[in-house]
Amino acid sequence: MGPSTSRVRRPIARRRGPSKGLPVRSLASRSSTRWSPFASPQNWRRRLRAPAAWRQVQRPDGGVLEVLADSSGHYPLVFHWGTPGAAVWFEPLATAAARTGLRLVMYSRPGYAGSTPRPGRSVADAAADVATVLDALGANTFVTMGWSGGGPHALACAALLPDRCVAATSLAGAAPYPADGLDWLAGMGAENIEEFSAALAGESVLTAVLERMAKDLVGVRGSDVAAALGGLVSDVDNRALTGEFADTLADVFRRSVSSGIAGWRDDDLALTRSWGFDLDAIRCPVAVWQGGQDRMVPFSHGQWLAAHIRTARAHLSPDEGHLSLAVASLDRIVADLAQLRSEARV
């Protein structure tokens, strides 16, 4: 989930209506110096499909969440990027969603990019944030998908929003820490072992590690991603890191540290502490997708989740990695989630 500590070093390139009284304002209405972490937000908007738009949604605590959503009338698929990960449009996912009658909705978790930090947040807090976003978009029920460090946040929605979340997908998602019978760090690349060992040592230790790691991400480009991730990239994942996919991951990483490391830090702390909910509370169907060549979130995490979520449907692929699984199977993953929604008749 984190980059190499001694790889790429580049200079920073600075470069539908609301409901329930929650304000929704276009990010374009704010000055770029106050809101966007980029000098030219237009460079990001031109990469979106026409129906997609940025919004800011006010949280009950007075903070804001930045939201990027397809404004079509399709059924919402709330997507959680991994760790670190701020909202960046992923066109192949949006296209796969639209093909199955879903519309892509994503937001930056607190502390990432334009979302106000919430120090001490738990994984469980994602459920309230998603409810706030959906209320603002005028949506009720939904399906959700989380990739990597986003997987636990999708599971939080499944557990804590039982009347709204009708199905969930954990895509190369992490298991809880600690988890009975699971050596949580075993099989991770050295970079992740360092990162999460620091998280377990405490906030000050973690902050120092992430501030160093973030230097590899502030100017990363698609061609740099494999080197920046270092030992976290297996051979099959390295082959997947090309073209638009590599460029999108680079965009995600740059945005994730564009306003500092608060979001990344709070993700890591939340993942290695009590998640704030019990997996036994999940009643909706959950698809668990995991690859056997994954050095970021090892295969054993997916096996553990599949065995401990009573509604789990396992899709375990021994020959795929953390990244290649999504590249090779994205259409199937989204179609499977849409099928779970169809079975729920919502």
Image (cartoon, rainbow, N blue to C red):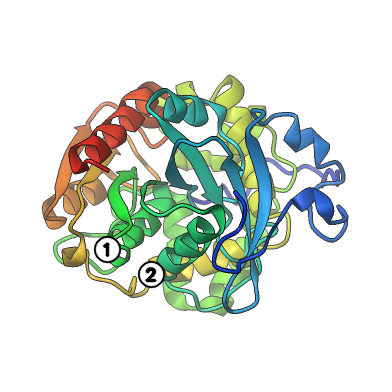
Residue drawn where x is 46% and y is 45% of the image = 79
Q: Quadrant of residue 165?
A: bottom left
Position of 257 with respect to 103 (left or right) is right
Would you place residue 220 above or below residue 156 in this image?
A: above
Residue 95 in sight here: yes
Q: Residues within 10 Å of mark 1 (few under 14, many from 20)?
A: many
Residue 30: image location, x then y, percent: 83, 56
**Amino acid, disc 2:** Ala
Residue drawn where x is 86% and y is 43% of the image = 15
Q: Disc 2 designates what residue?
A: 124
Which of the two residues, 163 or 20, is positioned nearer the viewer here? 20
Q: Locate the C terminus by quadrant.
A: top left
Callout 1 secondary element: helix
Q: Residues within 10 Å of mark 2 (few under 14, many from 20)?
A: many
Would you place residue 105 above or below residue 258 in this image?
A: above
Residue 176: image location, x then y, percent: 29, 64
Q: Disc 1 designates what residue?
A: 159
Which of the two residues, 225 or 82, is positioned nearer the viewer here? 82
Residue drawn where x is 59% and y is 79% of the image = 61
**Amino acid, disc 1:** Ala
Instruction: Tell me whether the residue at label 1 lies in contact with that at label 2, contact meaning CB atoms closer than 8 angstroms.
Output: yes
Would you place residue 27 above or below residue 20 in this image?
A: above
Callout 2 secondary element: loop
Q: Using the numbered discs, state the Cα–Cα distance from disc 1 to disc 2 in whole angstroms.
A: 9 Å
Residue drawn where x is 52% and y is 51% of the image = 2
Say which label, 1 or 2, has the lower sequence index.
Answer: 2
Residue 235 in sight here: no
